[in-house]
Image (cartoon, coloured by chain):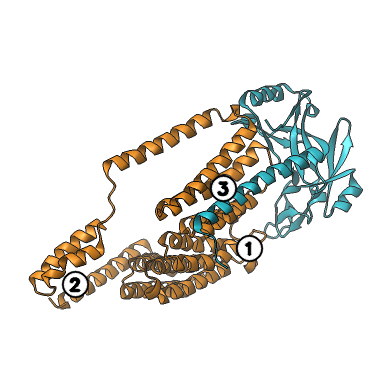
Chain colours: A cyan, B orange
Amino acid sequence: MRLPSVPIRIIAVAGVLAVALVGLVVREGVARAQGREVRLAVGGYDPRSLLSGHYVQFQLSDRLPAETACRWKGRRLEQLPGGWLAVRREGAGHRIVGMAETRAAALRQGEMAMRGKVTCIGAAWTPPGGTRQESSLSASLDIGIDRIHLAQDEALRIENALRTTLRPEDAQVILSVGADGKPRLKGVIVGGERTELGWF
Amino acid sequence: MASYRRRLEQDLDGWIGRGLVPPDNRQAILDSVGEGRRLDAATALAVVGAFLAGVAVIAFVAANWSAIPRLARFAMILAAFLGASGGAAWASRAGRPIASQALLSVAALIFAAAIGLTGQIFDIAGDAQVALRGAALAAVLLAAAGRSPWAAAVGLVLLALGDLVGEPVFNSREQPGLLALAIAPAAAVALVWRSQALAHATGACAILAVLTVGELFDARSEAMFMAGAAGLAAGAVAARAVRERYDAPAGVLYGWFAAGALMWFGIAGYYDSLRGVAHSVAWLALSAAAIGVGRLDRHGGVTAVGVIGLFVAGATLLFNLGVGLLTSAAVFGSLALVALLVAFVLRRRRPA
C-alpha cells in the first residue's frame, strides 16, 4: 500500500489532534453537567496568594486523621493504597469523612465516593540509644482541584468576598462528581453568591 | 558553506600551482560544492518584521485574554495549531523542507501549550505528567507524518519533562519513566534521518533518563548510576561502531553517550558503598581511555569529556587519600609539568 504524501499526512494528523482536543472539552463538559453536585468548604491557600493572575486559589478545609489515611514506610509517612474518598452530606454542604482502597469501601463510609489523594506529612527518627520518636502527623486532601480561573474583575470580587468572609462554611467549592468518580470543578460559593463556570 | 568554499578556492589554487590538480577542473570542483545560501537584507528585514508583528499580536491577545469569551479563546488556540500545521504542509509541498520542519516543530509546541491552556480555559483539572506525555505523543505523530526530526526532538524533550515534572527524582518515584524506553528508537531515527538536532536531544535525554529508572534498583542510587553508566557506555560503543556509516549524527550520539557514561560512573563513586581509592583510580583510567579514544577518533567532544573527567577524578582521588591542599597542589603541579614535558618532546619529534 502506498502512503499518502507528506502534506496530506501532516493535515490528517493535525486534524485528528484538533478533533481529540475538542472531544476532550466536550466530554469534560458533558460529564460536568451530568455529575452529582458536591459542595466542600474551602479556605484561602495562602492569604498573600488568594489571587494570583486571573485565578483564585484555595484549599479544602476538611482534614483526615493521619492514622486513617497514612502508613509508615521506614522513616517516611506515605498514603495508604487506594484513592477513593468517602463524602457525606452535612447541612448545606458536604464533608470528606474517610479514605478507602475501593469505591465500594468508600461508599460504606459515606453517601458518595470520589477519587482523591492525601499528602501525608510526618517523620520518625531514633536517637542513639533512645526509642523511636515521631513528629506531629497530618494528612491533607488533594482532589486535583485547587483553583478557579475567572475574568480579572470577577476574580477580584471573589477575593474581596473571601477576605471579608468570617465563617469557613461561607466559602465552598462546587464540584460535579461523575460516574467515573472524578471530581470536576463547577464553580464556587463565596459569601452566599454562587459563581459557576460556563462556555462563554 | 561560504567559508568552506573560500577555503577550497585557496586550496585549489595551491594544488593547481603545485600541479596536483589540472587547472581545467577548478570550476567543476567549485561547482560541485555550490554556493551557500545567503540571506539578503530585504529577506532579513522581512523576517524581523514578521517576527515583530507576531510578538505584537501575541501581546495584544494576552492583554485582552480574560475579556475574550472562553470558546473564542479555544478557537484561537486551535486556529494557531492548525495554521502552523497547515503552513508546514504547504512548505513541504512547495519544496521548502527547512520551513516545513520549523513550522511542524512550532505546531508541536503550540499543541503542548494548547493542552495546558484548554485546561485553564475550561477549568479541566488533570495530571501534568499525563498532559506532557500527551503532548509528546502528538509531537511524535506530527514528526512521523512530516518526517521531521525537529518535531521528534520536541516530542523527546516533552517526554523528558513528563518523566521529571512533579515527581521526585532519584529513589522515590513510583514507576520507571518512559524516557528510557524512547532513547533507542529516537537514536535510530536520528541516524536514519541523519539529524544532528535529534541526535543532540536524544543524547541529552539519555543522560537524564538515568534519573527516571530508580524504581528498578530498589532505591539504591549508586546501582542506578552504575547501570546508567554501563548502558550509556554500550550506547557510545554502538554509536562509535556506526560512525563511518551515519557520520555526523552518530558522532553526536557518541559524544553525549560517552559524556553521560563517565559522568554517572563518577557520581556513583560519591555513595558510601563505592566511595574509595579503587573507584577513583578506575575513574581516572576510564577518563584517560576516553582521551585516548577521542584523539584516535578525532572526536573533540569525547576528548574534552576525558580531560574534564581526569581533573575531577584526580581531585576525588586526592580527597579519598586524605591528602592536604598543599600536597594536592604539588601533585597537580607535577602532573601538569609532566604533561607539558611530554607534549614538548612529542612536538620536537614530529617530522617537519
The residue sitting at 81% across, 40% down in the picture is: A34
Which tag is nearer the camera, tag 3 or tag 1?
Answer: 3
Quadrant holding the N terminus of chain A: bottom right
Mark 1 or mark 2: name the one nearer the start of the chain. 1
* Residue type (three-letter) at the residue carrying disc 2: Phe
Label 3: state its secondary structure. Answer: helix
Label 2: state its secondary structure. Answer: helix
> Hey, which residue is sitting farthest right in the picture?
A108
Depth check, front residue: B46 or A131? B46
Query: Does residue A191 appear left or right of residue B228 in this picture?
Result: right
| Distance of label 1 from label 2 (alpha carbons) | 51 Å
Instruction: Identify residue for label 3.
Output: B112
Q: Where residue B176 is drawn, which disc sits there?
A: 1
Query: Does residue A163 appear left or right of residue A10 in this picture?
Result: right
Quadrant holding the C terminus of chain A: top right
Picture layout, residue B77 above or below residue A7: above
Picture layout, residue B232 above or below residue A136: below
Q: Where residue B344 is drawn, which disc sits there?
A: 2
Mark 3 or mark 2: name the one nearer the start of the chain. 3
Question: Subunit of mark 1?
Answer: B
Verify CB contact (< 8 Å) between mark 3 and mark 1: no
Figure label count: 3
Residue count near mark 2 (Cα–Cα under 10 Å), binned few <14, some 14–19, many ≥20: few
* Residue type (three-letter) at the residue carrying disc 3: Ala
| Distance of label 3 from label 1 (alpha carbons) | 23 Å
Mark 3 or mark 1: name the one nearer the start of the chain. 3
The residue sitting at 41% across, 62% down in the picture is: B196
The residue sitting at 19% across, 67% down in the picture is: B28
Question: Subunit of mark 3?
Answer: B
> Hey, which residue is sitting farthest left in the picture?
B17
On the image, the x and y values in percent for residue B324 come to 38, 63
Verify CB contact (< 8 Å) between mark 3 and mark 2: no
